[in-house]
Structures are given as structure tokens and as C-alpha cells.
Image: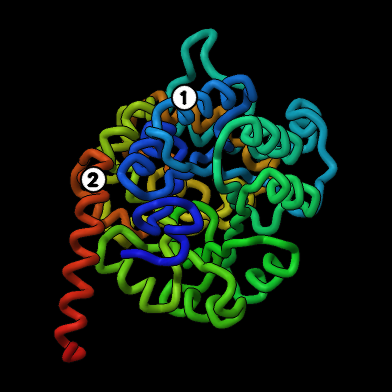
Amino acid sequence: MRTPLCDAFGIDYPIFAFTPSEHVAAAVSRAGGLGVLGCVRFNDTDELDRTLTWMDENTDGKPYGVDVVMPMKIPTEGTSTDLSSYIPEEHKKFVDETLLKLGVPPLPEGEGREGVLGWLHSMARSHVDVALQHRPVLIANALGTPPNDVIEECHAAGLKVAALAGAPSHAQSHVANGVDIIVAQGYEAGGHTGEIASMVLTPDIVDAVGPDVPVLGAGGIGSGRQIAASLALGAHGVWTGSIWLGTEEYRNLSSNKGWETAFLRASSSDTVRTRIYTGKPARLLKTKWTEAWAEEGAPAPLPMPLQNLLVADAHNRINASGDPDVISMPIGQIVGRMNEVRPVAEVMADLIAEFEATVKNLNGIAGF
């Protein structure tokens, strides 16, 4: 399993792993892939700096990347306190009443945090500034093309820039603005995702950007067979995410006692694409929380970043409660294959072994 991206990044396998856990990201990099640390959870740049220092020291000198959430167009924004004044009382009342109806207790006195600042444009810029003080080889943006000056700054520091795309036109726009690698994010994916399935989207984007722009297939990839399929569609590698939630290393991050139960029992049909998590369409595990927002009379989700600020405290309370029936959890349709918790190294080994077996089988079918 070797493509030009392996040489470009100094990795053994073109498996890129997005994760909010530094332990997972480091383990993937040590196993020969490229771990990509999601930075949106960091409200404190000092905490991100310490985490990236840990990554520098625990990846055995191997490369890693970081992922930020930054719109190309700079929004009008202030602090989270300023923005909270734009949240309608109707929405706040709905959240409070829903938490009460679902039996979600308040956080203990003194616990909790101020909103989710990582979704703000200004904080995302700070994330990039901190990352450039360390040694990532890739900056990925979950909201499309980063601002041009950010792309130029990353290129000047020797970093490649990746951006997610849910349509061929998005991918072409990214390339025109200087993005190096396109992540073709199919409908099946967890988190932010578009409306086109990977089987259709990947070759469409590969053809749209041409042979000189590397494309990573994303969405519904959690096995070696699916990696082989993505490469057969023209991708140069794969961007994986949900599959790493089912690893032992992820337990170092998660404080939710119910998340494992929730995804281990879920099938591939137990997800829903909704705007209730961030204000933009994202795929979540289907639970009583998502169902409440779909009921008649529920308010429409607010635009980003207001929806994040609205539900941030609710998510903290839900996570602390540990109720798998209520959890708010971004995850893709691959969840149906996540039926046990394993070490990252074991998952990587199985991905590679199944890929090799699949290619060998295809060669036999083709008569090679």
C-alpha cells in the first residue's frame, strides 16, 4: 500500500487518521500512517501548545498533522459572551426543557467550561499559530479553503494544506486558492459531510482536480477492503476518523462513560445527518437527543458558531451523565463495524493485512 503521498510525507502507508485524541494520533503515526490531531476542542492555546509538545516527543520522530475549523470568509465575531446575546431565548428554553425531559443532571458545582471557543475563526487562527511552533507536516481545514494568508503562511513554513470537499466544485475552488490535498468527504462520514456518497464523490473529485492534485477518500472507510476500493476510485490515500473512536488509546480522552456502549451496539443505520451539533450538516449517532431536535415544535438549529455555543453546556452535561441513550456523538455510518475496542496498532495492522488480501484477490480475478 504505497502511493506518492507516502514519499511526500515520509510515511509507510497513505492512511490519514483524524482524531481529537493526541494518544490516537501519535499511535497512528508510530504505526506508519499520519495521525492528524483535531484542535477544535482546545479553548486554551497553552493547552494546545503542551499537547503538541507531547506529540513532538511521543511520535518517535515520525510526522503528524493538525486539523482546524476555519472558514475562508472571516465572520463578524466577538467573544463567546458577545455572541451568546444573539441566541434566542426560545432556543435556550428548548435545550433546558429537553435536558430535563431526558433526565440529564446538571454538572457538579464548579465544573463545566465556557462555550466551545475552538469553533471561532479567531481561535482557529491561534491554533495555526501554535501549530507552526511545532513540527506538523500538514494543516487540514474542516470547513473548506482556509484564508489565503493562512495557506501562504503554512507553505512558507514547509507545510502542506488539506481541505475537505463534498462536491467537485468545492475541490476545484480549493485548488485554485492554493490547497495542496483534497479530502473527498462522502455522505457516509461522521461530522461535517455533504450529500454525495463516496462511491460517486471520490472519482468525481479525482477527475475534477486532475492527476497532479492528491485526493484522499473519506467517508465509510474502516476496513482494508474499503481502502482498496477508495484507491481503485482514484484516491491517493484515505482520510479516516470514526474508526479510531473504537480504540483503547481514545479512552485517554473520553470522559463519557456511555460512549463505548453507544457505538458498540449501534448499526450502520443508527446515525443521522443534522445541523444540531454545529449549525452545519454533520452526521451524529442517533439518540434521544437528536430525536428531540427532530420533533414537531423543536426550533431550527442556529448558524455556526451560535449553535455550538447554545449546546456546549448541554453536551458537557450529557457526556458527564454517561447515558448511552442520550449521548451527542459525531460518528459515521462505519459505526456498524465498530463492535470491539482494540489498540491502534492492531487496527492499523488489520487495515493493511486486509488491503493486501483484497488486492491479491482482485489480481486473481483479473488474471494477473
Which scheme is used to colour this image of the protein? rainbow
Give the percent coordinates (x, y) of residue 337: 24, 56
Q: Is residue 165 left or right of residue 228?
A: right
Give the percent coordinates (x, y) of residue 124: 68, 38
Q: Is there any visible trace of residue 90 in the rendered image? A: no
Dot 1: what SS?
Answer: helix
Q: Which numbered disc, 1 or 2, marks the residue closer to the eye?
A: 1
Q: Residue at x 79, y 54 (%)?
A: 148
Q: Is residue 340 left or right of residue 163?
A: left
**Callout 2, which amino acid?**
Leu
Look at the picture and state if 229 lies above or below 138.
Answer: below
Q: Residue at x 62, y 20 (%)?
A: 46
Q: What residue is pinned by disc 2?
A: 264
**Callout 1, which amino acid?**
Trp
Q: Residue at x 28, y 39 (%)?
A: 247
Give the percent coordinates (x, y) of residue 45: 64, 24
Dot 2: what SS?
Answer: helix
Say which quadrant the C terminus sits in: bottom left
Q: What residue is pinned by disc 1?
A: 54
Q: Nearer the viewer, residue 198 or 152?
A: 152
Q: Nearer the viewer, residue 237 or 82?
A: 237
The part of the image, by quadrant, that contains residue 137 is: top right
Q: Nearer the viewer, residue 225 or 2?
A: 2
Q: CA distance from mark 1 to mark 2?
A: 30 Å
Q: Residue at x 44, y 54 (%)?
A: 190
Q: Label 1 crowding class (10 Å Cα cut-off): few <14, some 14-19, many 20+?
A: some
Q: Label 2 crowding class (10 Å Cα cut-off): few <14, some 14-19, many 20+?
A: some
The part of the image, by quadrant, that contains residue 22 is: top left
